[in-house]
Image (cartoon, grey):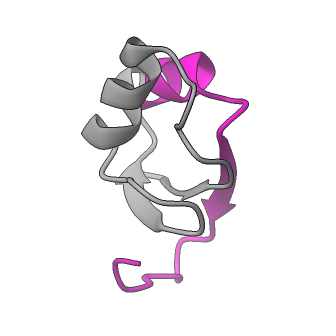
Amino acid sequence: MAKIRITQIRSVIDSKEQHKRIIRALGLGRPKYWVVHNDTPQIRGMIAKVSHLVRVEELSNGTHEAHR
């Protein structure tokens, strides 16, 4: 399964409560934190809701990076 790296690029201060919860559910919390998730429709839906707060990079098959 494809992997994606999600990096938080903006703070959640002054964001809607739902956006704060989505960021927390993705495993993020502060700008410049990043996590690796499987590329699933559920994760893509969460990313779509907070696309203004995060950056998404698709990782190649051989790339397995550590958490944060």
Residue at left 31%, top 26%? Answer: 21
61 part of magenta stretch: yes
Residue 6, given in percent of the width and then of the height, sits at 54, 54
* In this rendering, position of residue 52 left or right of residue 36: right
25 or 61: nearer the viewer = 25
Residue at left 41%, top 62%? Answer: 36
How many marks the image carries: the answer is: 0
Residue 20, given in percent of the width and then of the height, sits at 39, 29
Residue at left 68%, top 54%? Answer: 9
Residue 33, given in percent of the width and then of the height, sits at 49, 68
Locate the C terminus by quadrant.
bottom left
67, above or below 46, in the image: below
56, above or below 17, in the image: below
Residue at left 43%, top 82%? Answer: 64
59 or 48: nearer the viewer = 48
Q: Which span of residues is magenta-colored?
A: 43-68
* In this rendering, position of residue 15 left or right of residue 30: right
53, above or below 19, in the image: below
Residue occupying the far front of the picture? 14
Residue 43, given in percent of the width and then of the height, sits at 41, 31
Query: Residue 31 falls in which quadrant of the image?
Result: bottom right
